[in-house]
Amino acid sequence: MRPAAWILCLAASSLLPAQTHGETTLPAWTPGTLDIHHISTGRGNSTFLILPDGTTLLVDAGAAADGIPQTDPHPDALREPGAVIADYIQRHLPPGATGLDYALITHFHADHYGQVTQSSRMDSTGAYALTGITQVDESLPIRTLLDRGSPDYSYPVPLTDKTMANYRKFIEVKSAHGMTVARFKPGSATQIRLLKDASRYPTFEIRNLIANGEVWTGTGEQTRQLFPPLASLTPADFPTENMCSLGLRLRYGPFRYFTGGDLPGTQDPGFPAWHAIEPALAPVVGPVDVQVINQHGSMGEASDTWLEALRSKVLIIPSWAPSHPAPDVLKRIINSRFAPSSRQVYATDIREAARIVIGARANQLAGPPGHIVVRVEAGGARYAVWVLDYHDRRDKVLAGPITLVPPG
């Protein structure tokens, strides 16, 4: 097991912010560096990664449009979240990049892949509506799209809502024009890989951990199924969409990172114990330096067992609604007697309604809400965290860099 000790150190010159028009901005990505941008749109999850050789990966492109009180889009309501995500990515793309090598949809909820509404615009051909992932593709063509449902989208029950019908039309059209669409393969360490200069970065790996309850065993590419056969269940006990979320672990030298969509931490009262995914998944994930808190830090996530297994120094809450994060979750991830005893906790958003309920503990976050950027130096020996302003396109640095060293 990795040691619990952590080292805080001063930022090296390669991590120091640049100055633009009197404001502090994030330095541009450079080859060998791993960048992980957790984008705050106020309407869902979206994470953009630039891998060490310049390969690009987008995890989710949320565009919830449900009008929940106390929510509003960032930076404003003039553009849809999908367009804001694409614009943010274009500002941070590596030199020469014109699209996305990979996009990954963790599961089929509006705040992770989009939502078709009466006001949704159609694409240039009139074939499908632009929202979330389909809108990102309009500006940044996706080469390979991975999700949990391809090709039939029938597990655990057929998915037939309006947004799914639109998504399937999108992949039908784009597949005919060269986009690869495939089901995410738990256990695989090669489905998402470096495409431009892999031999130069032999310590880099993305391991697919879980999808549809099929979880990696930790040996080779072997998997096991957490969910019972559907034939043995009543429909009320079927796996939920959140339970079917994808999860992956990224490794770069000594650095580790985990993200897992909306995987639940506990089962709802009266439901089977296997509805709780975190307890079964935690030993497979193992210690990681940075983790994205599952399900926006809603009630029941990030249990003591989960936190003890992952032992993360940096925890990022992809919050956007007034229920994110739940007060009990924030209490657990900030206050802890197990290693590492001092954690850096960030949130992409804290609504005023959430702040009122949470109280003073909301002031214990490591930085203000914003785009949370993790930058890992070549080889993974050190990493830094920034918070960028989401109020406009300048991406001004609000906090950081805080530079950390992974346990040896």
Image: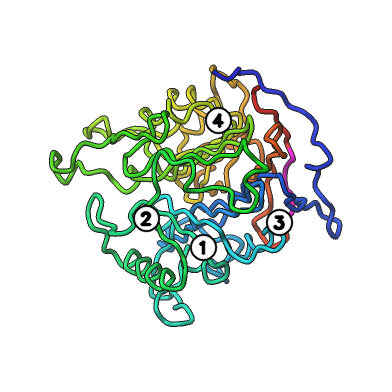
Give the extent of the magenta segment: 396-401
**Residue ID for mark 2:** 108
Image quarter (top left, top right, bottom left or bottom right) of the N terminus: top right
Q: Where residue 350 sits in the image (x, y, percent)?
A: 55, 46
In this view of the protein, can residue 369 be seen by the observer?
A: no
- Amino acid under disc 3: Asp
In the figure, residue 382 lies in which quadrant? top right
How many other residues sit within 10 Å of disc 1, few (<14), some (14-19) or many (≥20)? some
**Residue ID for mark 4:** 288
How many other residues sit within 10 Å of disc 2, few (<14), some (14-19) or many (≥20)? many
Which one is in front, 94 or 223?
Answer: 223
Q: Where residue 266 sits in the image (x, y, percent)?
A: 34, 32
Q: Is residue 5 above or below residue 391?
A: above
In this view of the protein, can residue 94 be seen by the observer?
A: yes
In the rendering, which numbered label is found on residue 143?
Answer: 1
Q: Is residue 70 above or below residue 381?
A: below
How many other residues sit within 10 Å of disc 3, few (<14), some (14-19) or many (≥20)? some
CA distance for labels 2 and 1: 20 Å
SS for tag 4? loop
Q: Earlier in the sequence, mark 2 or mark 1?
A: 2
Image quarter (top left, top right, bottom left or bottom right) of the C terminus: top right
- Amino acid under disc 1: Arg
Which tag is nearer the camera, tag 1 or tag 3?
Answer: 1
**Residue ID for mark 3:** 395
